[in-house]
Image (cartoon, rainbow, N blue to C red):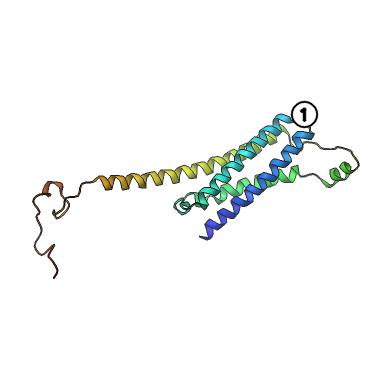
Amino acid sequence: MAEALGVASSVIAVIDLSAKVFSLCLQYSREVKNTKDDIERLCKEVATFQDTIKELRALLEGFRGRELKRSQQLVSAIEDGHSTLGMLEQRLRPSTGRKAMSRFGMRALKWPFESKDIEGTIEKLERCRENISLALNIDQTVILQNVDDRTTLHQLPIAYGASFDSKAEEHNPICLPNTREELL
């Protein structure tokens, strides 16, 4: 139970942080001219990661969340995403010098990443999303196997009166001595 709460709190922290990073990216996209493609790709990946985390949260907090055993152990993937988003937010957050310059009407906003840095960051977020998706696929497969097992068991014929539910002995019940004796 404590692990589930840890995952839920990590998911909430990632959602909050991804919203901050997304808004900072939008601010840069409005004010910085030459890096629009990098900013748009990063914004798209952050938004996709945020959507994935929100869906994960909804699943884990849903009434069947406890059945998702593998997804309850996603702390490392969520924390990797959280640290990547934290690094992004830290580098995107306006410095105190820029805040002071903007008060005097000067715009000194510069994109703090190189294109290769953005590629690496996007790959990290994609890897986190893939790990989350893989865990959800494993949980889904386990649930489907359980449903299939239950369906198969419900389709088996029941031979009332036969000692071992043998279909061949359905109409000729044969019992071992001292078994199936009536009480009272």
Drawn side of residue 142 relative to residue 102, left or right: left
- Amino acid carrying label 1: it is Asn
Residue under the point 68% across and 47% down: 86
Residue under the point 41% across and 43% down: 141
Residue extending furthest front? 184
Residue nearest the viewer, comparing 112 with 33: 33
- Judging by the rendered image, the residue that carries numbered circle 1 is 34
Residue extending furthest right? 104
Residue nearest the viewer, comparing 54 with 130: 54
Q: In which quarter of the image is the C terminus?
A: bottom left
Q: Please, what secondary structure does the residue beneath circle 1 have?
A: loop
Q: In which quarter of the image is residue 107?
A: top right
Q: How many marks?
A: 1
Drawn side of residue 168 relative to residue 67, left or right: left
Q: Residues within 10 Å of mark 1 (few under 14, many from 20)?
A: few
Residue 148 position in % (x across, y down): 33, 44
Residue 145 position in % (x across, y down): 36, 45
Residue under the point 63% across and 48% down: 14
Residue 88 position in % (x across, y down): 70, 43
Drawn side of residue 89 relative to residue 149, left or right: right
Residue nearest the viewer, comparing 180 with 69: 180
Residue 20 position in % (x across, y down): 70, 45
Image: 180 above or below 128 = below
Drawn side of residue 48 relative to residue 67, left or right: right
Q: In which quarter of the image is residue 100?
A: top right
